Image (cartoon, rainbow, N blue to C red):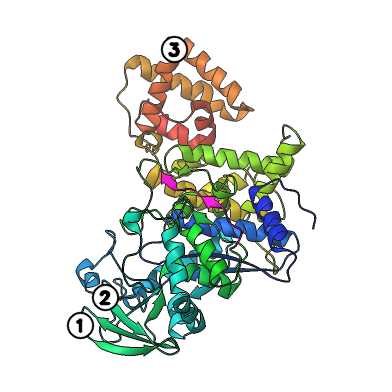
Amino acid sequence: MDKKNVHWADETADKVIHEKGEKDLYTCASGITPSGTVHIGNFREIISVDLVVRALRDRGKNVRFIYSWDDYDVFRKVPLNMPNREKLEKYLRFPITMVPDPWERDESYARHHERDVELMLPAVGIHPEFLYQAENYRASKYASEIRAALEHKDTLKTILDKFRDEDHKIQGQWWPVSVFCGECNRDDTDIEGWDGQWKLRYRCNACGHKTEADIRGDRGIKLSWRVDWPMRWKYEQVDFEPAGKDHHSHGGSFDTARHVCRDVYNWDAPVTFRYDFIGIKGSAGKMSSSSGRVVNLEDLLKVYTPEIARYLFAGTRPNTEFTISFDLDVIKIYEDYDRTERIAWKAEAAKDQTVYEREKRIYELSQVTVDSSGKTVMPPVMPWQIPFRHLCNLIQISGGDIDKTVAALEKNRDGPVEEQIPGLLARCRCAKYWVEECAPEEFRFRLKEAGDLARLSEKERAGIRLLRDRVIAGIGKFTGDKDCAEEIYKTAEEAGLEGKELFRAAYQALIGKDQGPRLANFLRSIEQDRLMAILKGY
């Protein structure tokens, strides 16, 4: 398939093909240590890889997408948002995979966080092959690679020191491996020697255990992570893997890994790019699993539909820092996506062909469904659009009843058809959650019941009666909000009120607030009989 370079994922896919050459299989990788909640900043790497994977597959390439759980890393710190903290603290310095699940749902702390992610990723159309490093290390899959690191430990020391100043260079005896004690499971061990073949001698500082371990069968020997990462590039033959800007800083872990990969494991480092941090509107600083200050994918999907969750990342270059909002900016994000969708379906004209191709590609990569080969599948028909702000108002008018809201929309002449209902329901669920849990108080309202009268002056009450009998009684005659609004202003003038005075009185009578949704549209969105009943007592 001929795909133009109109998106950064396409640019990266072409770079992978150019630098790695034509191959029967391209391997794209991502991974993380499940040391705490896997937050939306971590998700940026996952979806960045997924977008490049899709771009490669759109070019007819066979792609393996691997996601490594580094669950054999050390449990160094108990995140602030974890339950049973005292229990967890007893397992500090253990491998994460041996820490118990504080929620008592899964077999380990690591598996709990892994499972949370694995269950959510299909919702946004991401289907990697999961690799578990505790399992691989314990099965001695990397025995030869560990021995190679020991054989080249002086080379590795030189590489690691290359980017360090004198105060931070490795001092004294150094080993490129660590050992979890076979007795107490902690990593507080010192290696005392290597026989030049397969056996290491170590002593545990925590429990005093001292023994000889065989690299080919001992379950506790692990490469240090600056060696482990490039080793796995060679082992899995990785062609592409991005990294955060901290890893991509000059002299950072990617620089050293590139040298280790080439000089020790005889493999060229993968094509890469730097991705930036993500902020959360109203929260300062970057997210951190260890601190517990996190928003995860599940939180994101409560407010944004899966397509728009993908759009947030597909529509932003990975090296651009951006903020995910849960405030009123949510409305604009939905509006931006809807515009992209209209352009992609040619329901709205783009500024020029370049803009059309870019917006269409962003829209394609935002879709969730993929076919058996992993290529994106477009919706069978253009989704039925309803502005998010208006939908939030309709849901509040219905008292939060989504079924009632959708049923009312289906009655419209231009309402959704059957194929469009699932997408509408998904948007409704997000709108309901956002209104009830995230929206500012001034955005929220509840319609008054009949007989619940507002405190109004007699002049205001007269204005409400006139609004009821002149505008609402004939609400069906208006063809749009503009002619309805004109009639409301005429009513205010006839009642001897300023327009804003009648508006305030109407909002007080309907929702008990001084302000509310645009009045003409609001009145036209509510059932006439319900409006008449609410205003009957005036």
Query: In the structure shown, which secondary structural element does the residue marked by tag 3 occupy?
Result: loop
Query: In the structure shown, which secondary structural element does the residue marked by tag 1 occupy?
Result: loop
- Alpha-carbon span between mark 3 and mark 2: 83 Å
Q: Nearer the viewer, mark 3 or mark 1?
A: 1
For the residue pair 236 and 468, the one nearer the viewer reads as 236
Q: Which residue is mark 2?
A: 188
Q: Earlier in the sequence, mark 3 or mark 1?
A: 1
For the residue pair 240 and 494, the one nearer the viewer reads as 240
For the residue pair 507 and 146, the one nearer the viewer reads as 146
The type of residue carrying mark 1 is: Cys
Q: Which residues are magenta?
A: 270-280
Q: Are marks 3 and 2 in contact (CB under 8 Å)?
A: no
Residue farthest right in this picture: 2
The image quadrant that residue 176 belongs to is bottom left
What number is the disc on residue 463?
Answer: none
Left or right? Give the position of 275 relative to 112.
right
The type of residue carrying mark 3 is: Ala
Q: Is residue 407 above or below residue 179?
A: above
Q: Which residue is mark 1?
A: 207
Residue drawn at point x = 22 percent, y = 66 percent: 85
The answer to whether residue 388 is visible is: yes
Q: Which residue is mark 3?
A: 495
Residue drawn at point x = 49 percent, y = 65 percent: 31
The type of residue carrying mark 2 is: Asp
Quadrant location, the C terminus: top left
Q: Position of residue 4 (x, y in %)?
A: 75, 49
- Residue 312 shown in magenta: no
The image quadrant that residue 87 belongs to is bottom left
Q: Position of residue 522 (x, y in %)?
A: 50, 32
Q: Nearer the viewer, mark 3 or mark 2?
A: 2
Label 2 crowd bin: few (<14), some (14–19), many (20+), radius 10 Å: some
Residue drawn at point x = 55 percent, y = 18 percent: 487
